[in-house]
Amino acid sequence: MGFDVFFILIGAVMVLAMHAGFAFLEVGTVRKRAQVNALVKILVDFAASTVAYFFIGYSLAYGVSFLQSAQIISGGADSGFAAQGYDLVKFFFLLTFAAAVPAIVSGGIAERAKFYPQLIATFVLVALVYPFFEGLAWNGNFGFQTFMEGAFGAKFHDFAGSVVVHAMGGWIALGAVILLGSRKGRYKSDGTPVGMPPSNIVWLALGAWTLSVGWFGFNVMSAQKLEVVSGLVAVNSLMAMVGGILAALFVSRNDPGFIHNGALAGLVAICAGSDVMHPVGALATGAIAGAVFVWAFNFQQNRLRIDDVLGVWPLHGLCGTLGGILCGIFGLEALGGMGGVTFGAQLVGTLIGVVIAAVAGFVVYGALKASIGIRLSEEEEFVGADLAIHKISSTPDSDFR
């Protein structure tokens, strides 16, 4: 048991490090006047997520409460908890997944969202919305997986969260972004988009690299026990990442922002089927996701005129949705996969997750918008979130030059 405790603890730490990746990806993408806000949001959202998940969310998803003595929850004799605090580090590991949802949302609403309404949204999402679907998919709550198996011949399969984490985060973010509206100056009066390029490609690249490395903890350690860990998951994650990079390279015509996000698109998509696909199927999954991300980002920004700053809906929402569905194709034995999945189960399970997330995004952020407001004032947005909210810029010495 000690080996399992250490194994999942390392996974938790690797996914915790991914939150630094979320932060620096946002820092490099937003304009300079919102860099401090990006860093603070990710850190504080993680803290709020921890409290929400510990006291409410984890119990809702798995029916486990830690509001008992330390002797019991650390695995004392006849306590009902696993020895050596395994259940506690499992909570830590799954918390880092739950906290990824508001970290995803953060990138979409950057530069113009109020700070404390977002903190409230984070608490509600991680305490109630995310664990509701997490419990359906990963714990079979309310007979969900029994129904899926009976109706479609297999349970809904999402090994590491293409849908449970990423599609949920991306589709929740879509509602928030639409309700917020676009940044001032992002579109002309006739709807023509105005370019707002990334502020720092170096920080963006660092964020993408940090996320990519941590993702191997995200995926491989989703086995949760050392005895069932699989090298197939690691190689499939690698191949999907590579597929996403190469597809984004060609489709975007060498754009560095798209190339680095292409890696993430591939990794988002492979989460669901990383344990059942053949590496060639994983490569194809990543390539499809990378190409779809570039196309969908441009379509969202330029045709739909939805100002999703980091493109979290195409990256996490659409690529996560793709990953859930493609698991039911490339995971089939006929295409070299491990089997045990069906297209019908993957399609329906994925769409259920998408509907829950999309509705929740509009309901949670709509309620906040109607009650306390979710957007900075025009003057605050002009000054920038850093000075308006935190009273300091990322390079305060330059403010006095």
Image (cartoon, rainbow, N blue to C red):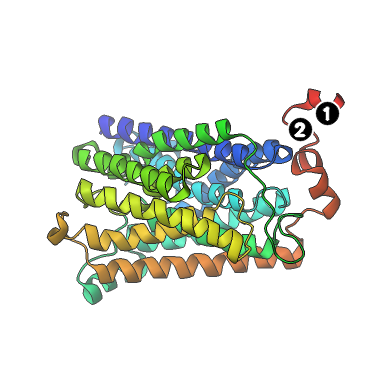
Task: Give the vertical position of 31 relative to 333 (above or below).
Answer: above
- Secondary structure beneath disc 2? loop
Residue in front for this viewpoint, 172 or 299: 299
Residue located 56% across and 42% down the image: 46
In the picture, the disc for residue 95 is none
Instruction: Please state the horizontal and vertical placement of residue 376, each as a whole percent of the image.
Output: 78, 53
Q: Amino acid at mark 1?
A: Asp
Instruction: Please state the horizontal and vertical placement of residue 83, each as a whole percent of the image.
Output: 30, 36
| The N terminus lies in quadrant | top left
Q: Quadrant of residue 238?
A: top left
Residue in front for this viewpoint, 110 or 83: 110
Farthest residue to the bottom: give it. 151
- Which residue in the structure is indicated by mark 2? 393
Q: Amino acid at mark 2?
A: Ser
Position of 144 with respect to 334 (left or right) is right
For marks 2 and 1, give the CA distance.
Answer: 8 Å
| The C terminus lies in quadrant | top right
Task: Give the vertical position of 304 relative to 277 (above or below).
Answer: below
- Secondary structure beneath disc 1? helix
In this view of the protein, can residue 48 be seen by the observer? yes
Whether the residues at callouts 2 and 1 have beta carbons within 8 Å, the answer is yes
Residue located 55% across and 53% down the image: 311
Q: Quadrant of residue 25?
A: top right
Q: How many marks?
A: 2
Q: Residues within 10 Å of mark 1 (few under 14, many from 20)?
A: few
Position of 128 with respect to 213 (left or right) is right
- Which residue in the structure is indicated by mark 1? 399
